[in-house]
Image (spheres, rainbow, N blue to C red):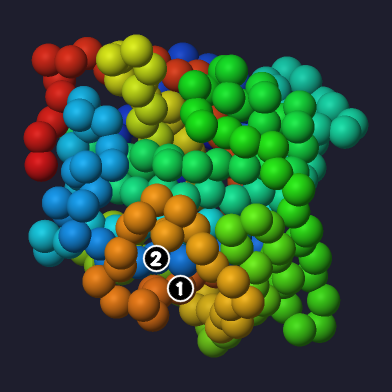
Amino acid sequence: MVINRTTYESRKFELPKIPWMLKQTWENSLFIHYPVKKELLEQLIPLELSVDTFNGVGWVTIVPYYIRDQRGKGMPPVPGISEFPGYNLRTYVKGNGKPGVYFFYLAAANIVAARLAKTFFRLPYKFEKMKMSKGNEGVHFESNYLKCQYEQVNNPFSPKKGSLDEWLLERYCLYTVSKGVVFQCNIVHPSWVLYEANVEFHHNTFLSKYKIEPLWDKPVLHFSKRAEVNIWPLVPVKMNEHFSS
């Protein structure tokens, strides 16, 4: 994928001027969204960040997905660490005014990839054994905190401007905090092509692990077949640019 500003002209923010450092392809991504009280999330995220809300409500999202063709800039994919399943639990925040995500937990089924991500991106990455396969009945995913079967339904669509879909998914950076310093990592890809999803949950204990109580039990669901992603290095956020929601 060739990165240029016209590809992303609908973004509210310019692409970073420094080069990207990592490329990945995300496949068979399932987004499991739950609404949560803002006050609860404020107790769980670092003080340096602000909870972002949609109509006054915070959200958390569980995302199982498959990473393929991972490689550094100017390098070919490295055998053994270029593809593996993973999943994460995130919420929605603002740091320096740019909407982004904050990760409570990330796991990869590749110990080397998990350690590298934890080191270079200062994220709470873990190595975790998991299974992910795709067959006639959809995608099967199995991990410590989530086991489910899912499939796409209906026709593809793009998030409408101002919709909850857009608010949840059109986010192009993550924030992490290390020793009181806020860091931002830009993550850029074309706008999502989404599907609705059917999901059969066998177990889902992610939220209880963090004592997160959703406002309702039935999640909002999205599915994406594929997204090509470019990831930039961490950069520190100047505290005087901190944005409060």
Query: Which of the 4 image quadrants contains residue 69?
Result: top right
- The amino acid beneath tag 2 is His
Query: Which of the 4 image quadrants contains residue 51?
Result: top left
Circle nearer the N terminus (2, 1): 2
Crowd class of label 2 (few under 14; some 14 to 19; many from 20; radius 10 Å): many
Location of residue 39 in the rendering, given as x and y in whole percent from the top left corner: 14, 51
The residue at the point 45 percent across, 53 percent down is 209
The residue at the point 28 percent across, 38 percent down is 45
Location of residue 65 in the rendering, given as x and y in whole percent from the top left corner: 64, 55
| Element at label 2 | strand
Answer with left or right where residue 175 lies relative to residue 231.
Answer: left
Mark linked to residue 178: none
Answer with left or right where residue 8 lies relative to residue 160.
Answer: right
Q: Is residue 129 visible?
A: yes
Q: In the depicted view, which residue is nearer to us: 148 or 173?
A: 148
- The amino acid beneath tag 1 is Leu
Location of residue 20 in the rendering, given as x and y in whole percent from the top left corner: 55, 23
The residue at which mark 1 appears reads as: 221
The residue at which mark 2 appears reads as: 33
Q: Is residue 236 visible?
A: no
| Element at label 1 | strand
